[in-house]
Amino acid sequence: MLHQDIKQSRIVIVGDDEAFCKDVSIALNDAGFSKVVVTETFDLEAKNKPDLLLFSSKVLNQALAQKLDQFKALSWAQRCPFMCIVSDDQVAFEQETISLFDDFIVFPRDIDRLGLTCKTLLSISKERARLEAELAKKTQKADLALVLLKQAERKILQQNPELPDETKENNNIIADMSHELRTPLNAILGFSEIMKQERFGSLGHEKYLGYADDIHNASRHLLGIVNDVLDLAKTESSEENLVITEVSARDAVNETLRLMALLAEESGIELSANIPDEFPDLKTDERRFKQVLTNLVSNALKFTRKGGRVSVEGQYDTENGAVLMVIRDNGIGMSSEELALALSPYGQVLDAQTHTHIRGTGLGLPVSKRSIEALGGDFSITSEPGLGTAITLRFPSDLVVKNNS
């Protein structure tokens, strides 16, 4: 039984043989399709676009082939799938003709499977149109992100007309890199997901699934790069608007750990939180605070070996009423020289890269530090090679919500 929206699809049969068109119409009606139209010509400019086009191979000519070629170049929001119905007595087509159509069926030999074939093409068409729409939204967001990045760049240059040429060149590199990443990022995100889920059928050889995973991981990596670059631009821009509310630090930590749980499990790392039940709320920007926690926990997991530990602890500074959030790991650690490099924008510790297959932008720690400072807190870090790293986020008493109980 066909799904209701598929059954209501408008199917147009293009053919000049009355008996042929009647047989095909009957087969479609028997399969559950009720909106079947027969015509002798195909109008590329028709306003009432069909959901599926069926062509008799006997009407194919050079002019029609050119129209189909133009039609197939359109997006799935503007076109529809089309099938060629070939007679038993016709010879094989050339490759150019075969490439014009989404599917072929032999008449009358395969007439019994016409309904199923049409259903499949219609389902694929709807899915492709949906994915294209999602891809368009992601592209729009990427365009907006690029505009924000350009605005931040112009603001910096206007406020600092005497910036060294090297700094100006770095700003241009940021903008150019974001632009260059936009196109491959959107394509990789959309189509690698299709391949991973094998939505349109099996990929065949098992290595293809591995390649699909690699492509998807690369897309996530690219997304991380774009986000890091934009976050850095925002922290350097005075135009950033922070929304300060009372935020539950305990809830924020628990949410972060839920997000990171799968990564920790896959990496074989113990992830835990130690936040006292009565830990006070903070006056901060919730989105930015959670983003910092996610960045730092993710970073700790990335540079901790299998079997290691990563924890988030809430502590009190009873002397002056401040509260501390400590993200601690027993990972590879850093020397003082490596730590200074890691805290600089785009700085990447070479030895750390040998311990992970993920190469980042070198922006995680600098962005987190600037974000905490923008929120009115202090960011400090200690690390020792082979022993691990501890990052402390300190919020002074004026950012702590007093408990009246």
Image (tube, rainbow, N blue to C red):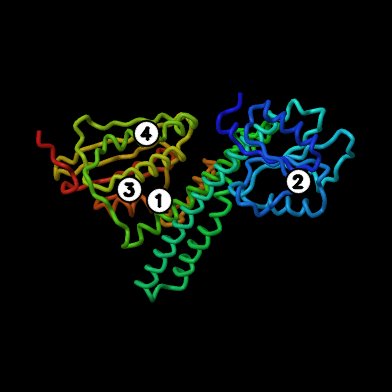
Of labels 3 and 4, earlier in sequence is: 4
The disc labelled 2 sits on which kind of residue? Glu
Q: Which label sits in the foreground, 4 or 1?
A: 4
Dot 1, crowdedness within 10 Å: few (<14), some or many (≥20)?
many
Q: Disc 4 and disc 1: Cα gap in Å?
A: 25 Å
Horizontally, residue 245 falls left or right of residue 19, namely: left
What kind of element bears circle 4? helix
- 115 above or below 194? above
What residue did someone put label 2 on? 40
> Between residues 41 and 175, which one lies in front from this camera angle?
41
Q: Where is residue 11 in the image (x, y as percent from the top left)?
A: 66, 38
* Residue named by callout 1: 339
Horizontal and vertical percent position of residue 34: 63, 32
Q: Nearer the viewer, mark 4 or mark 2?
A: 2
Distance from Cα at disc 4 to Cα at disc 2: 63 Å
Quadrant of the frame with the C terminus: top left
| Alpha carbon distance from label 3 to label 2 | 62 Å
Three-letter code for the amino acid on which mark 4 is drawn: Leu
Q: Which residue lies furthest to the bottom in this view?
A: 162
Q: Pick the quarter of the image with the N terminus.
A: top right
* Pointers 3 and 1 in contact (C-beta within 8 Å): no
Marks 3 and 2, the one that precedes in the sequence: 2
Numbered label attached to residue 257: 4
Q: How far apart are marks 3 and 1 (CA)?
A: 23 Å
Residue at image mark 3: 288
Above or below residue 24? Residue 395 is below
Residue drawn at the location 23% of the way across and 37% of the way down: 315
| Dot in front, 3 or 1 | 3
Mark 4: give few (<14), some (14-19) or many (20+) Cα within 10 Å. Answer: many
Q: Which residue lies furthest to the top in this view?
A: 1
Q: Where is residue 77 in the image (x, y as percent from the top left)?
A: 58, 47
